[in-house]
Structure formats: structure tokens, C-alpha cells
Image (tube, rainbow, N blue to C red):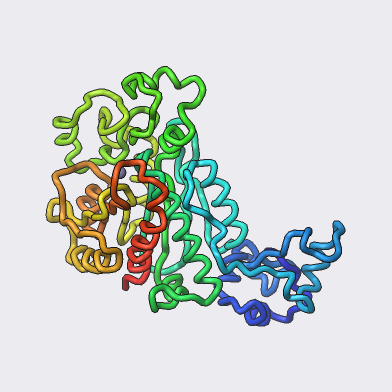
């Protein structure tokens, strides 16, 4: 929400009036404060909205501006976000994601959203960043198309964190602002937008024939994991990729498991590798389905912290910690091999993919423990 500042004498007065940490207000107005402005004429207030005009007494074009000026006498016209604006429990398509990113950007301008690359079909791959600490933590979802439930869960977790920040809330006993100050959180909620759209919306016009062929002639795309080139994006990283290439079936583009012609050949994977290299994350977590377990090692290259974190994650979620499985070329495999830092593949839920939405609440409550434990990692 944007307000006029003329009724206030200082930023600190605004901070006290809205009961918001000053730094969240400053970070929501970087464009003004970066220019050194002491108190701009207008300012974004995170975590608040004005009630829609249908709830306002005076319904005229000037209402919003007059409300901006008169909110002091009439606090009830302001709406503080205390519950999630995002509903993750739905078929979470790229269209829903775009809409929700716009909602979060509007309500919480201190969170930034940017494009880190494009999919095969030119759809944007987006990254959300929250916080400004030295510890860099990255979490992603939907590397695999029919695991789209992970995107809804991750977006709702992000929303819960943003709410905790603007409501002086806590994260399992730790203050949310403590995490904001010590962690720079990077979120890529949907690595494979084309694949997710294929599973939820069906094949895009003009590509039906090719996709049907890769899907063995079936119009049922619910088993599809790959991107629209028929390459499995979590089989594409340069961590013993040749072993996977040699032993994996199929040997040509398909709904799942095909590792491609060479590592990093797919734009989605190249975008993720570039992001990781540039960002120098201290920990990465990839959300997949299914199994209610997670993998935390790769080739003995994982640091001592990985085992400690695995114990915490296991306790906070009830998921089984598994050091490693006979698999290569995955995102977390490459991250551990290349950087020697903690990386995790978390398998949400239990059953056959796509995991039914009836499991959503249970999954959310299990994974919330891991999300918060990661943010509280010091
Ligand atoms: Zn997966």
C-alpha cells in the first residue's frame, strides 16, 4: 500500500504508527532511499492494503487519496495482512504462480522478484529474494512437471514468512526479523513451468503431435516429469552425468528420465546453474515428490553441517533422512560436488505423482518445519 507522508515527521514515526520494523519500510522503498531521500512524499507500506472501495463509505474517484490522508483518524479503513493471500492447495499452474507473485510483490515490496531465465517455450523462470543476511539459502520447487504440488507449498511458506515479518511474528520460537537480518533467502518456485503447464493444462497448440509421440501416444500427461523437450531436468547436471547417460532408459526424449545429449543442454537447467554459480549459496534445498524422506549426501563430498542439518530436518518434519541413493546428475548432487556445501532433495508426500491435493495440508505442516529450520540455521 502506498501512502502520502505529509502527516508524518519522520520515518520512525511511520514505523511506530504501523508497528513495522524500519528496515522493512526502507527495503520496500529502495528506489527512494537509495537516492538518499530522508522522507519521500509517498512511501510503500508493506503488509497493509486499503480496503477495496466497495467497503469505503465515500465512493468516489478521490476516495483512495482521501483515505491515504485520513487513515490516521480512521484506522479501520486499513487492512493488515495477517493471513495468507496465497492459496497453494490447488492445481498450481504457471498462470497461478504469476498472479501470486504479483500479489506478493504488491503487498510486500521488500521482497524482490526477478526473471533468472526462460523455459524452452519462453516462459519466465522467476526468483524471489527476501532478507539481507550473509547466509545465503536457496529453495526451489517443480523441477519435475507432475510434482507441481511442491510449488503451491513453497509459495504458501513464503507467504507465511512474509506475514511473520510484518506482524512481528516468530519462526518456531525465533524472531522472524532475526532470519531476515541473517539470511538472504532465494526462492525459485517453479523451475519447469512448461512441464507443469503440460500436466495441468495439456499440450500447447502446435506441439501436440511431438509431445504425444514422446508420451508414447497417450493423451494422459499426468506421468510427465520432463520439460517440453522431453529432457529430465534433474538428470542434467555435470555430476557423473555420463553414468546416468550410459545406464538410463530411455535413450531419446521422453516423458521422464532422459538425461539429454549433454549436461546443462536445457535452458531451465542452464538458468539454475548460472543462478547457483553467481549467488554462491550456502545451502540449497529442492522440493520433489514423493516418499516422505530426503537425501543429504553425494559421493562423500557433503560437509559435516549436512548431517547436523539432516537430523534437525528429520526431527522437524518426521521425514526419513537418507544419506545418499544410487543416483547422479541431480541438482543437489552437482551442488554438493561442486561447492562442498549442504544440499538436500526433499521428497514431499507419499503415493503416486501427481500427489493428490488431499495430502496438501499434511505436507504443508511437515515441510514448514524444514523451511523454518533452514531459516533459523546459524
Ligand atoms: Zn522429482
Figure quadrant of the N terminus: bottom right
Q: Give 170 or 353, whichever is nearer the viewer.
A: 353
Residue 78 spot, x, y in % from top left: 70, 70
Q: Give 111 or 278, whichever is nearer the viewer.
A: 111
For the point 31% across and 61% down, which residue is it?
282
For the point 40% across and 40% down, which residue is it?
192
Residue 367 spot, x, y in % from top left: 35, 60
Figure quadrant of the C terminus: bottom left
> Is residue 134 shown above or below 235?
below
Q: Is residue 172 left or right of residue 128?
A: left
Q: Is residue 342 left or right of residue 221?
A: left
Residue 101 spot, x, y in % from top left: 54, 51
Q: Is residue 249 left or right of residue 213?
A: left
Q: Give 343 or 203, whichever is nearer the viewer.
A: 203
Residue 111 spot, x, y in % from top left: 53, 61
> Is residue 358 shown above or below 40?
above
Report the label total.
0
Q: Quadrant of residue 116?
A: top left
Q: Give 248 or 362, whichever is nearer the viewer.
A: 362
Quadrant of the displayed image that contains ligand 1: top left
For the point 86% across and 64% down, which residue is it?
58
Q: Quadrant of residue 184?
A: bottom left
For the point 21% across and 67% down, which residue is it?
311
> Is residue 98 shown above or below 187?
above
Q: Is residue 343 left or right of residue 79?
A: left
Q: Residue furthest front?
A: 358
Amino acid at each position: 500500500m502506498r501512502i502520502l507522508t505529509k502527516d508524518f515527521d519522520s520515518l520512525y514515526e511511520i514505523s511506530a504508527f504501523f508497528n513495522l520494523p524500519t528496515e522493512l519500510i526502507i527495503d520496500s522503498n529502495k528506489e527512494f532511499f537509495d537516492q538518499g531521500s530522508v522522507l519521500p512524499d509517498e512511501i510503500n507500506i508493506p503488509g497493509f492494503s486499503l480496503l477495496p472501495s466497495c467497503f469505503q463509505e465515500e465512493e468516489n474517484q478521490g476516495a483512495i487519496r482521501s483515505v491515504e490522508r485520513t487513515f490516521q483518524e480512521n484506522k479501520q479503513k486499513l487492512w493488515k495482512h495477517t493471513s495468507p493471500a496465497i492459496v497453494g492447495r490447488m492445481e498450481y499452474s504457471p498462470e497461478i504462480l504469476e498472479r501470486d507473485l504479483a500479489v506478493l510483490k504488491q503487498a510486500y515490496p521488500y521482497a524482490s522478484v526477478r526473471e533468472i531465465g526462460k523455459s524452452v517455450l519462453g516462459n519466465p523462470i522467476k526468483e524471489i529474494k527476501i532478507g539481507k543476511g550473509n547466509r545465503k539459502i536457496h529453495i526451489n520447487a517443480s523441477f519435475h512437471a507432475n510434482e507441481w504440488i511442491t510449488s503451491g507449498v513453497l509459495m504458501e511458506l513464503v507467504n507465511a514468512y512474509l506475514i511473520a515479518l510484518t506482524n512481528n511474528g516468530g519462526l518456531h520460537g525465533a524472531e522472524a526479523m532475526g532470519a531476515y537480518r541473517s539470511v538472504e533467502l532465494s526462492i525459485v518456485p517453479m523451475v519447469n513451468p512448461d512441464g507443469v503447464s503440460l500436466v495441468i493444462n495439456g499440450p500447447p497448440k502446435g506441439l501436440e503431435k511431438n509431445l504425444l509421440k514422446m508420451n508414447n501416444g497417450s493423451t494422459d500427461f499426468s506421468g510427465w516429469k520432463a520439460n517440453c523437450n522431453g529432457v529430465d531436468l534433474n538428470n542434467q547436471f555435470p555430476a557423473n552425468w555420463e553414468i546416468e547417460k550410459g545406464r538410463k532408459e530411455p535413450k531419446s526424449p521422453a516423458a521422464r528420465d532422459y538425461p539429454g545429449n549433454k549436461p546443462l543442454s536445457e535452458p531451465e537447467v542452464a538458468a539454475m546453474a548460472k543462478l547457483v554459480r553467481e549467488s554462491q549459496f550456502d545451502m540449497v534445498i529442492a522440493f520433489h515428490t514423493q516418499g516422505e524422506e530426503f537425501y543429504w549426501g553425494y559421493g562423500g563430498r557433503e560437509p559435516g553441517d549436512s548431517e547436523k542439518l539432516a537430523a534437525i530436518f528429520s526431527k522437524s518434519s518426521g521425514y526419513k533422512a537418507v544419506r545418499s541413493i544410487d543416483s547422479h546428475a541431480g541438482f543437489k548432487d552437482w551442488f554438493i560436488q561442486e561447492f562442498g556445501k549442504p544440499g538436500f532433495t526433499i521428497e514431499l508426500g507419499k503415493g503416486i505423482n501427481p500427489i493428490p491435493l488431499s495430502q496438501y495440508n499434511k505436507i504443508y505442516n511437515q515441510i514448514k518445519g524444514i523451511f523454518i529450520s533452514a531459516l533459523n540455521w546459524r
